[in-house]
Image (cartoon, rainbow, N blue to C red):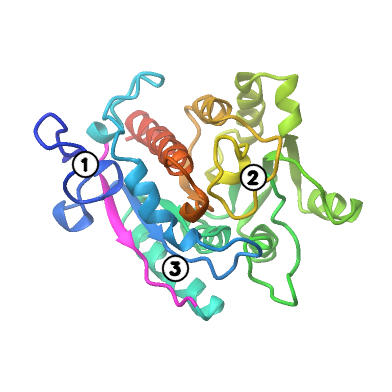
Amino acid sequence: MRGPVDAAQVPRFTGWSTFARLPRRDEVDHCDIGILGFPFDAGTSYRPGARFGPAAIREGSRLLRPYHPGLAISPFAGAQVADCGDVVANPFDIPEALAQMTAATTALVATGAVPVALGGDHTVALPMLRAVAGRHGPVALLHFDAHLDTWDSYFGVAHTHGTVFRRAADEGLLDTSRLTHVGIRGPLYGPGDLAADAALGFQMITSMDLEETSAREIAARIAARIGDAPLYISVDIDVLDPAHAPGTGTPEAGGLTSRELLGILRGLAGCHLVGADVVEVSPAYDHAELTAIAAAHTAYELISLIAMHKEKNP
């Protein structure tokens, strides 16, 4: 195994800007967990800039260390994790971009690697889901977001960051008995939004539910719903309150803290995670790298969950 660059030998502010200073894919002979960048934001409906998210998250990951004390695991020691670079996606043609991202992710998954995507707007979750469902069949979905992202279209366009899970359901990529939103909040277009979402099979844990229920209890509830099914986790960074993640395209007041997000993820240890993404980081609206650092730690948590499952199920 080849892990991150040794920070005791090479200062953290130097060298290649790979995620967590991990090796590039071309520097290792195999890959168990592959980090893919999707610098694409043509599907965004408000503030653009998430195309610069992958680079920002990689920069925000420089301070990550190789041992996770909360999960008692060294995720880079038991699994070969590599940064597979950015996927080239047409910024002017969403269908073509989706096809390009699907092909790249499918090629990675075909090697047996588990993909973790750095977005990019939330549209990029669809090619990820196509690739993992192509290998594992319909997957359970845990979706952290301020928004439902199950609308049918925007301005007559079927593929946007707000329609991604409606399209995934239409394509049969989701296990409809194991779908959960976490962190939903803010105004909607009308009560029909909730009815249409529930008709797809989603259960909802709102951000206000965390006022009455601990992250640990919520994680236990989610884990019971998922069971041993193959699981995909999608994290829109706007699930966090703007105080914790100002650098995003569609911020909503009243969100989770970064501690609550990481705590829920940590409570899912043992779940069979087959793919994940962290999306909607728009660094032009960030300051002091708050959003990028939160996204990097979220990705590190996801990688650690994947590594734990691989360690216990070789």
The quarter holding residue 149 reads bottom right
Instruction: Look at the numbered disc 2 and give the secondary structure of its residue.
Output: loop
How packed is label 2: few (under 14 Cα within 10 Å), some, or many (20 or more)? many
Magenta-drawn segment? 79-91
Whether the magenta-drawn stretch holds residue 113 is answered as no
Vertical side of 117 occupied by 1: above or below: above
In the rendered structure, are the residues bearing label 1 and label 2 in contact, judged by CB atoms less than 8 Å apart? Answer: no
Specify whether 38 is left or right of 237.
Answer: left
Identity, as a three-letter code, of the amino acid under mark 3:
Met
* Position of residue 307 in the picture relative to residue 187 (left or right): left
Q: Position of residue 35 (x, y in %)?
A: 35, 51
Q: Which is nearer the eye, 221 or 110?
A: 221
Q: Position of residue 296 (x, y in %)?
A: 40, 40
Q: Nearer the viewer, mark 3 or mark 1?
A: 1
Q: Position of residue 43 (x, y in %)?
A: 59, 68
Q: At 31% from the left edge and 33% from the top edge, which residue is drawn?
A: 64
The crowd level at tag 3 (other Cα within 10 Å; few <14, some 14-19, many 20+) is: many
What quarter of the picture does the C terminus occupy? top left
Q: Position of residue 87 (x, y in %)?
A: 37, 66
Camera-side residue of 154 and 250: 250
* Picture quadrant of residue 71: top left
Give the residue pinned by disc 2.
145
Q: Earlier in the sequence, mark 2 or mark 3?
A: 3
The tag earlier along the polypeptide, 1 or 2, is 1
Location of mark 3 (residue): 101
